[in-house]
Image: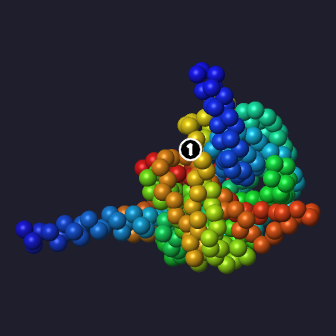
């Protein structure tokens, strides 16, 4: 009984920790052929170094990069459908469809 | 009997209406947005809890928005509007400001001192409101260096009904102890398009002003019973005490948004 209690307690801690560190990412069409994405975490921590990918309509990764020191990533907008992925590790993936990216 | 009850009632009404506080509003329908948005903010001087008289605002002395320490002067963007209250109209202002990047936008208004005939004093309510985009916290808890201001100790755009809100009152950057802070909520529907308060109130206002007094560190805490927009006005906390030869009450106002979980 006691033995079981500990893993359960740990499990209870995991969602709380995840919630306090929710990833945030927003992208904007700069209107000059470029797209700017900015990232961060809900507790105010930086997204510097987080992996970024741009995926085309066929599911092919066309661009990869990293969030810079300011938590920003700028790329040339691809032709056609695309989506942006912000990948801060398991449970911290955000996908933004290109159709949602406006000025 | 009836006659007596009626006259007592009418007298009581007149007294309670005047016992409610002046509040400088910086009103927007929402304090949290998740997409790039043009915020429609109204600057109105009124009595929000009893939805009473609205007062004429003069040309503001200062109005800006702070985003990650970068300030944008909003004085040039101000538009004069006529605000309609339930029983009168008054000069007010409106500003449209586009919010794109994620984080905290702290709006701060220093209005022109308002001459209050009834008390023969001037009132100047230095007012803040925080709008957040996309949940990213970037400075809602930082003072702006105003003459007097309330610094929130809970996220001011995300207070849960039934929880508490704590603020620290500063005067010239230092904690202001023993100051009376009045507490009100916007008690009627705000018609953004018509620049008007509705005629009907959400609820019966409390019998007299709600008050919290700041402690030795300038802190006050208030338990918020219901969702809505709540304001705190700490009275006479600013350094300036005189305007055009008359007494000046330089107050600090902060608006918060209270939501149901």
For the residue pair B107 and B39, the one nearer the viewer reads as B107
Residue A13 percent location from the top left of the image? 29, 68
| In the image: residue B160, left or right of residue B125 | left
The image quarter containing residue B176 is bottom right
- Residue A76 in view of the camera: no
* Chain for numbered disc 1: B
| In the image: residue B144, left or right of residue A23 | right
Residue A39 percent location from the top left of the image? 54, 66
Q: Which corner quadrant holds the N terminus of chain B?
A: top right
| In the image: residue B235, left or right of residue B78 | left
Name which residue lies at 55% across and 37% down.
B203
Name which residue lies at 48% across and 69% down.
A43
How many numbered badges does the structure rendering display?
1
The figure's colour scheme reads: rainbow
Name which residue lies at 72% across and 33% down.
B86
For the residue pair B189 and B10, the one nearer the viewer reads as B10
For the residue pair B162 and B69, the one nearer the viewer reads as B162
For disc 1, the marked residue is B206
Numbered disc 1: secondary structure: loop
The image quarter containing residue B217 is bottom right
Taking B6 as reference, is B174 above or below it?
below
**Outermost top residue:** B2
Name which residue lies at 64% across and 32% down.
B8
**Outermost left residue:** A1
Residue A81 percent location from the top left of the image? 55, 49
Crowding around mark 1 (Cα neighbors within 10 Å: few <14, some 14 to 19, many 20+) is few
Residue B183 percent location from the top left of the image? 60, 54
Taking A10 as reference, is B111 above or below it?
above
- Residue B20 in view of the camera: yes
For the residue pair B94 and A102, the one nearer the viewer reads as B94
The image quarter containing residue B254 is bottom right
């Amino acid at each position: 009984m006691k033995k079981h209690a500990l893993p359960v307690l740990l499990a209870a801690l995991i969602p709380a920790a995840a919630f306090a560190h929710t990833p945030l990412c927003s992208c904007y069409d700069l209107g000059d052929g470029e797209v700017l994405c900015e990232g961060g975490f809900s507790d105010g921590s930086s997204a510097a170094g987080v992996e970024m990918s741009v995926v085309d309509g066929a599911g092919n990764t066309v661009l990869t990069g990293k969030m810079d020191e300011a938590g920003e990533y700028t790329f040339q907008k691809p032709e056609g459908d695309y989506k942006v992925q912000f990948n801060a590790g398991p449970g911290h993936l955000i996908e933004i469809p290109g159709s949602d990216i406006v000025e | 009997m009836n006659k007596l009850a009626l006259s007592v009632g009418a007298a009581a009404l007149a007294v309670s209406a005047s016992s409610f506080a002046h509040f400088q509003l910086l009103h927007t329908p929402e304090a949290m947005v998740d997409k790039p948005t043009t915020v429609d903010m109204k600057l109105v001087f009124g009595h929000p809890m009893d939805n009473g008289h609205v007062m004429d605002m003069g040309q503001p002395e200062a109005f800006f928005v702070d985003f990650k320490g970068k300030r944008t002067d909003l004085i040039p963007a101000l538009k004069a509007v006529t605000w309609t209250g339930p029983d009168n109209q008054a000069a007010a202002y409106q500003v449209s400001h586009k919010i794109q990047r994620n984080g905290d936008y702290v709006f701060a208004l220093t209005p022109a001192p308002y001459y209050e005939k009834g008390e023969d004093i001037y009132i100047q309510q230095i007012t803040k409101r925080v709008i957040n985009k996309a949940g990213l916290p970037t400075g809602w808890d930082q003072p702006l260096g105003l003459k007097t201001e309330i610094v929130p100790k809970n996220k001011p755009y995300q207070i849960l009904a039934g929880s508490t809100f704590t603020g620290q009152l500063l005067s010239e950057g230092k904690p202001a102890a023993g100051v009376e802070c009045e507490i009100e909520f916007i008690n009627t529907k705000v018609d953004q398009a018509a620049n008007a308060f509705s005629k009907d109130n959400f609820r019966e206002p409390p019998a007299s002003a709600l008050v919290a007094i700041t402690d030795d560190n300038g802190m006050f805490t208030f338990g918020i019973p219901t969702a809505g927009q709540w304001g705190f006005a700490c009275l006479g906390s600013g350094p300036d005490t005189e305007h055009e030869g008359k007494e000046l009450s330089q107050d600090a106002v902060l608006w918060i948004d209270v939501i149901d979980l």
